[in-house]
């Protein structure tokens, strides 16, 4: 009975019972400020990669405070896209990129995958 009421309430409110891609947003945290940027030393950015792991190629960078949208998860790695901030025009890599980042450096909320 409780389950039926819960699904009826979700439907009445126009919500989905499952997480939808992009319903989860957040910000980059825990990296050095851009004033300490050094690509060679790995300072002042969060590497965005082609896959969920450090062995994958880096394709772009995210910076402290950049806003992201989360589309998927694989363990501690999150598939994200740049929404706003310096990631729209990074110091290195693709602007407004989509890729994978390590979850320790993002703060997320909403309905997450």
Image: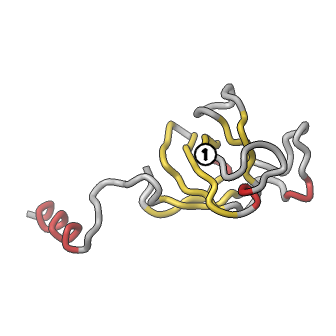
Location of the N terminus by quadrant is bottom left
Whole-percent x and y of residue 98?
Answer: 60, 45
Front residue of this view, candidates 22 and 41: 22
Q: Is residue 99 above or below residue 82?
A: above
| Residue at 20%, 67% in the rendered image | 11
Name which residue lies at 13% across and 68% down: 5
Q: Residue 96: image x %, image y %?
A: 67, 52
Task: Kindly give the residue lying farthest to the left in the view shown.
Answer: 1
Question: In which image quadrant can residue 19 be found?
Answer: bottom left
Q: Residue at x 76, y 60 (%)?
A: 86
Whether residue 19 sits left or right of residue 38 in the image: it is left
Residue reaching furthest to the bottom:
13
Q: How far across and how far down the image is residue 18, in percent? A: 31, 54
Q: Is residue 83 left or right of residue 47?
A: left
The residue identified by callout 1 is: 98
Q: How is the image coloured?
A: secondary structure
Residue 107, quarter of the rendered image: bottom right
- Is disc 1 surrounded by few (<14), some (14 to 19) or many (20+) residues within 10 Å? many
Q: Which is more toward the observer, 29 or 92?
A: 92
Which of these two is toward me, 95 or 37?
Answer: 95
The tally of labels here is: 1
Q: Secondary structure at mark 1?
A: strand
Find residue 16 and report its image quarter.
Answer: bottom left
Q: Residue at x 27, y 58 (%)?
A: 17
Q: Position of residue 74 (x, y in %)?
A: 50, 37
Between 1 and 69, the one lying in front of the other is 69
């Amino acid at each position: 009975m409780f389950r039926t009421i819960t699904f009826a309430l979700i439907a009445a409110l126009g919500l989905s019972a499952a997480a939808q891609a992009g319903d989860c947003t957040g910000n980059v945290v825990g990296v050095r400020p851009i004033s300490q940027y050094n690509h060679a030393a790995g300072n002042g950015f969060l590497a965005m990669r082609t896959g969920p792991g450090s062995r994958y190629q880096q394709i772009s960078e995210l910076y402290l405070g950049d806003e992201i949208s989360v589309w998927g998860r694989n363990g501690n790695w999150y598939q994200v896209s740049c929404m706003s901030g310096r990631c729209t025009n990074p110091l290195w890599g693709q602007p407004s990129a989509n890729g994978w980042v390590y979850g320790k450096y993002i703060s997320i909320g909403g309905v997450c995958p």
